Structures are given as C-alpha cells and as structure tokens.
Amino acid sequence: MKKSVYSLVLMDEVVDQVDRLAYSMHTNRSNMINQILAEYCSMLTPEKRMQTTLTQLERLLDQEGFQAMAQPSGSMLVVRSALNYKYNPSVRYRVELFRSPEPEFGQLQVQLRTQNQELIYYVNKFMVYWADLEQGYLGKVHSAVENGRFFRNLRYQSAFDQQGSLAGNAVGSYVNYFDRALKVYFRYLDHPAASEMVEDIMKEYVSSEIPKV
C-alpha cells in the first residue's frame, strides 16, 4: 500500500495515548494512527494482517506445547521447544512476516541452541533431508541450511486473504510437523527406519487439509 505525508492537528492528550499504544505494540506513532484509522474504516493494513497471523500462530503453538519467548517486533514471533536428547537443548523457531505478502509472506528460521558439534552435525543432516523431502513433495520451496540453522520462506496462498487467521494456522501446522519430525529423528537416531519415519510425517503433512506454505 502506498503511503504519503499528511499534516494532522491532534490534541496532545490523544498523541500521548497513541504513543503509549504504539510502544506496547512495537511500532511508531505514524503506523499506529494509520492502523487505528484503517480499522475504523474497516480496511486491512499490512500491520493488521501480520498481527492477525501472529496472534493465531501463537495461540496454536501454545496449544501444542511450544514456549513463547520475548517478541522483538510486531512482525515476528519466536517460540522454542525442548529436544529430548543430550543436555535437552532447545530448538528456537522464529517466524518473521513481510509487509508485502506475495509471492512469499514471511520466513521461518529454525535453530538448535547448542555448541555441541555432534548435535550440530545430526541436526544439519536432518534439515538437509527435510529440505530434500519438501522439494519432492511440495515442489519448489526456497530454503537453506547453514551450520545448524534452517531458513524457509513461507509461500503465499490466495486463501489467506479470505480468512485472516488461516495463514497463522498454516504456519503453525508446518512448524508443528517440522518439530515432530525433528524429535522423531533424534529419538530413533541409530534406528535404520528413522528416515522413513520422518518421511511418513512429511506425507502426513502433505495430505492434511491445511493450506501448505
């Protein structure tokens, strides 16, 4: 959406309240006023779209047992999950949404919080395998694996425009399947069927009715 500069005459008390609200929502005064006016006029702003998506995503992941962390901005959600392996390292999932939703509306970053080189080796191996499965089952997906970190762009679906919370459900579903597959992989690390069990989870995700990101 295009933005222009306008002059407004506002009461000082109103501006004070707007600034407090903007601070609590990790944005600035101009964006806050824009959101308030757009909501009053029943318009969907990029900020409102991102807020709806992240609110639904946080609600869904909370139900699945993920722990929310301090949120650095209004366009980002960070949660973590414990991996039942040596020292119980945490896996951090960071979802960052883009102001422009097409063709990709955000990025997921997954990182294992450890300095253990053995763990990094195995998590890299899992992430590369998962990325290969995605290319085979979901088609072209922009992803990368770098030293224990997985970067995955989130593909836009036209259905997300019709229901604001649907994007949050779609991302939450993907994160949950990824987390399940990661934990299964480490639980059966030395089992010859570990890769097959991970692929079964991918197949389950592909066959689910939720839109694929």
Image (cartoon, rainbow, N blue to C red):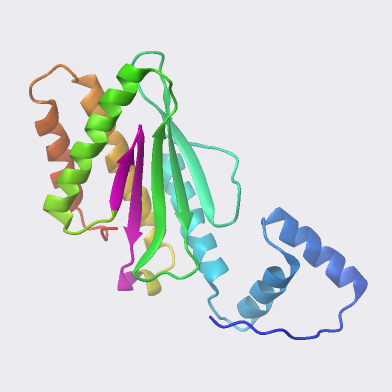
Residue furthest top as drawn: 86
The answer to whether residue 16 is left or right of residue 52 is right
The answer to whether residue 2 is left or right of residue 200 is right
The answer to whether residue 80 is left or right of residue 3 is left
Is 161 part of what is drawn in magenta? Answer: no
Identify the residue shown where x is 51% and y is 48%. 77
Identify the residue shown where x is 13% and y is 46%. 203
> Is residue 127 in sight in this rendering?
yes
* Principal secondary structure, stretch drawn in magenta: strand
Q: Which residues are magenta?
A: 143-159
Residue 169 in percent (x, y) is at 37, 55
Is 145 part of what is drawn in magenta? Answer: yes
Identify the residue shown where x is 24% and y is 56%. 141
Task: Look at the picture and state if 24 lies above or below 200.
Answer: below
The answer to whether residue 31 is left or right of residue 119 is right
Residue 98 in percent (x, y) is at 47, 63
> Is residue 207 in sight in this rendering?
no
Residue 86 in percent (x, y) is at 35, 13
Identify the residue shown where x is 16% and y is 52%. 135
Q: Quadrant of residue 6?
A: bottom right
* Image quadrant where one finds the C terminus: bottom left
Residue 125 in percent (x, y) is at 22, 30
How many numbered callouts?
0
Q: Nearer the viewer, residue 106 or 158?
A: 106
Q: Quadrant of residue 15?
A: bottom right
